[in-house]
Image (cartoon, rainbow, N blue to C red):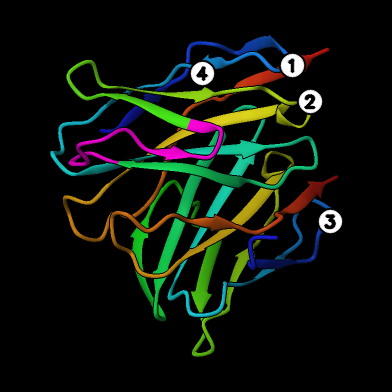
Amino acid sequence: AQKITQTQPGMFVQEKEAVTLDCTYDTSDPSYGLFWYKQPSSGEMIFLIYQGSYDQQNATEGRYSLNFQKARKSANLVISASQLGDSAMYFCAMRDFNTGTASKLTFGTGTRLQVTL
Amino acid sequence: DSGVTQTPKHLITATGQRVTLRCSPRSGDLSVYWYQQSLDQGLQFLIQYYNGEERAKGNILERFSAQQFPDLHSELNLSSLELGDSALYFCASSRTSGLGNEQFFGPGTRLTVL
């Protein structure tokens, strides 16, 4: 069974600094995808970044990058130059595709990030 | 705005009642997913439909059912509601059910069962 672990329930970072949110995963499937979502206090889930298990390079999207270490089964999210608007809950998620139909996302418990002045 | 719409935004009802949550996926998306977010269970996958057919099932209770219609909108039906069903229910959609297709989430329906 798939499992996503986010060990940091809460994190603080100063504005303009970089922050790393940890995510480790467990799966026996060779093909999988890793996702990060942001959930602000308003409640919506915002897609941030995606990394495929066979991708050779780490994914980047603007200020977001994914530090993918396959051997360690980790997919940490790095946010550079933090902004006050980055304060939110962040979820790591995984999807496997081995069965061809299991497209569900398995989520971690989330990390609450607070950006301070 | 993800392009996924969900109605209603809030729903307050009593135990034992039945409610229907509605979701319209992004234009062109064939796959619809339902998730439940509660304080004690976190974010859990309920069910997935692809082009009208059920594709994957998660921790969905027998009291819950869903369907996807020919116009691709989906409905999640919750019956014999219990206090523990109070949660934020998300619908998400993706282009296909393929691996790299990110799921775009709707704003959610907050269900309160009194």
Q: Residue at x 52, y 66 (%)?
A: B65
Which of marks 4 and 1 precedes in the sequence?
A: 1
Q: Which residue is mark 4?
A: A21
The stretch in magenta equals A52-64
Q: Is residue A83 left or right of residue B62?
A: right
Viewer-side label of 3, 4:
4
Spot occupied by residue B40 in the image (x, y as percentages of width and height):
62, 27
> Cα distance, mark 2 to mark 1?
7 Å
Give the quarter of the image for residue B84. top right
**Quarter occupied by residue A30:** top left
Mark linked to residue A15: 1
* Circles 3 and 2 on the same subunit: no
Mark 2 or mark 1: which comes first in sequence? 1
**Mark 2 and mark 4: Cα distance apart in space:** 16 Å
Disc 1 versus disc 3: distance between alpha carbons?
Answer: 34 Å
- Residue carrying label 2: A84
Secondary element type, mark 1: loop
Kindly report which numbered mark, 1 or 4, lies closer to the viewer in this rendering.
1
Does the magenta segment cover residue A59?
Answer: yes
Picture residue at 76% right of the left edge, 61% below the top: B17
Q: Are the residues flagged by discs 1 and 4 from a single subunit? A: yes
Instruction: Please state which of the two labelled residues, at mark 3 or mark 2, is closer to the viewer.
Output: 2
Q: Main secondary structure of the magenta part?
A: loop
Amino acid type, label 3: His
Foreground pick, A50 / B70: A50
In the rendered image, residues at marks 2 and 4 fall on the same chain: yes
Q: Is residue B99 above or below residue A40?
A: below
